[in-house]
């Protein structure tokens, strides 16, 4: 049975290169390509792929936002995040959001094809160089050191995305159908997790982590 794949990346050359690498295996078929997060969600609904290759940094909706929505709407789709970032915080955010794999854009075509096959079979894949970052993070935690990585989830992501858009607490509450006090509670947890206080700092952090 052919593994159906959607590739989502805002750079055409990257999308086409990934598609060519995957289509080189007769067991894999790239059925569609998306150039932004919103299109990735639409294609997920329309094409019902088995696997999605997802860039974190895309216009419209970032990769983490796409992951968060797919976890609710299409949890059966196995998502492999493919990015140039090797920050442990970004890696853990993606895993917490439901990613089945995390590959560096320096991966080879064979590594990409094997990752798709493994993810489709229910396994998880992390590029070895990225796995070393995870080991360091967990080693620090085991030694009792303060971890700098505390992934945001659910409503926290929704609130932060609206903060990035410059909305006030009241405007965020109206859009999410929650009270301003609840918005403030979410912001308190976001600040605790990120260690940041000002909205400008949170906005910059969100952009760096492809949340927006």
Image: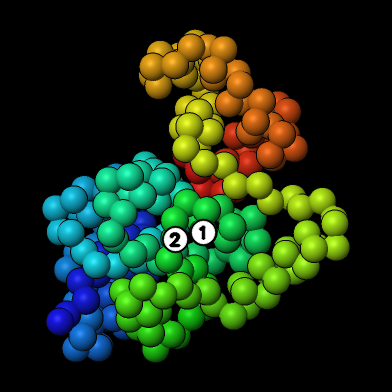
Using the image, tell me which numbered label, if any, was put on residue 99: 2
Q: Dot 2 surroundings within 10 Å: few (below 14), some, or many (20 or more)? A: many
Q: Is residue 187 left or right of residue 114?
A: right
Residue 26, above or below 86:
below
Q: SS of the residue at dot 2?
A: loop
Q: How is the image coloured?
A: rainbow
Question: Label 1, label 2: how many angstroms apart (C-alpha)?
Answer: 5 Å
Which quadrant would residue 169 be assigned to in this image?
top right
Q: How far across and how far down the image is residue 67, in percent?
A: 40, 51
Q: SS of the residue at dot 1?
A: helix
Q: Dot 1 surroundings within 10 Å: few (below 14), some, or many (20 or more)? A: many
Residue 31, above or below 208:
below
Q: Nearer the viewer, residue 10 or 121?
A: 121
Q: Which residue is found at the position 14% from the left and 53% from the top?
A: 46
Residue 106 is at least partly visible in this image:
yes
Q: How far across and how far down the image is residue 177, in percent?
A: 39, 17
Q: Which residue is found at the position 47% from the left and 51% from the top?
A: 97
Using the image, tell me which numbered label, if any, was put on residue 95: 1
Residue 189, above or below 122:
above
Q: Nearer the viewer, residue 12 or 94?
A: 94
Q: How far across and how far down the image is residue 144, in percent?
A: 85, 57
Q: Quadrant of the N terminus?
A: bottom left
Q: Which residue is found at the position 71% from the left and 34% from the top?
A: 192
Residue 59 is at least partly visible in this image:
no
Residue 212, above or below 106:
above
Q: Which residue is found at the position 23% from the left and 54% from the top?
A: 44
Question: How many marks do you count on the picture?
Answer: 2
Q: Is residue 111 left or right of residue 169?
A: left
Determine contact: label 1, label 2, CB under 8 Å.
yes
Which quadrant would residue 2 be assigned to in this image?
bottom left
């Amino acid at each position: 049975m052919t593994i159906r794949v959607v590739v989502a990346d805002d750079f055409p050359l990257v999308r086409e290169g990934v598609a060519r690498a995957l289509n080189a295996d007769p067991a894999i078929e790239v059925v569609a390509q998306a150039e932004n997060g919103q299109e990735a969600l639409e294609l997920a609904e329309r094409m019902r792929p088995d696997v999605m290759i997802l860039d974190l940094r895309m216009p419209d909706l970032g990769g983490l936002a796409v992951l968060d929505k797919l976890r609710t709407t299409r949890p059966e789709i196995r998502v492999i995040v493919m990015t140039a970032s090797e920050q442990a915080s970004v890696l853990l955010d993606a895993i917490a959001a439901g990613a089945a794999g995390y590959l560096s854009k320096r991966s080879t075509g064979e590594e990409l094809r094997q990752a798709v096959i493994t993810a489709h079979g229910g396994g998880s894949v992390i590029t070895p160089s990225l796995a070393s970052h995870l080991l360091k993070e967990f080693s620090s935690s085991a030694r009792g050191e303060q971890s700098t990585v505390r992934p945001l989830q659910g409503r926290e992501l929704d609130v932060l995305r609206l903060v990035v858009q410059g909305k006030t607490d009241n405007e965020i509450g109206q859009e999410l159908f929650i009270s301003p006090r609840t918005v403030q509670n979410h912001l308190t947890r976001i600040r605790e997790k990120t260690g940041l206080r000002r909205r400008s700092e949170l906005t910059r952090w969100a952009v760096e982590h492809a949340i927006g």
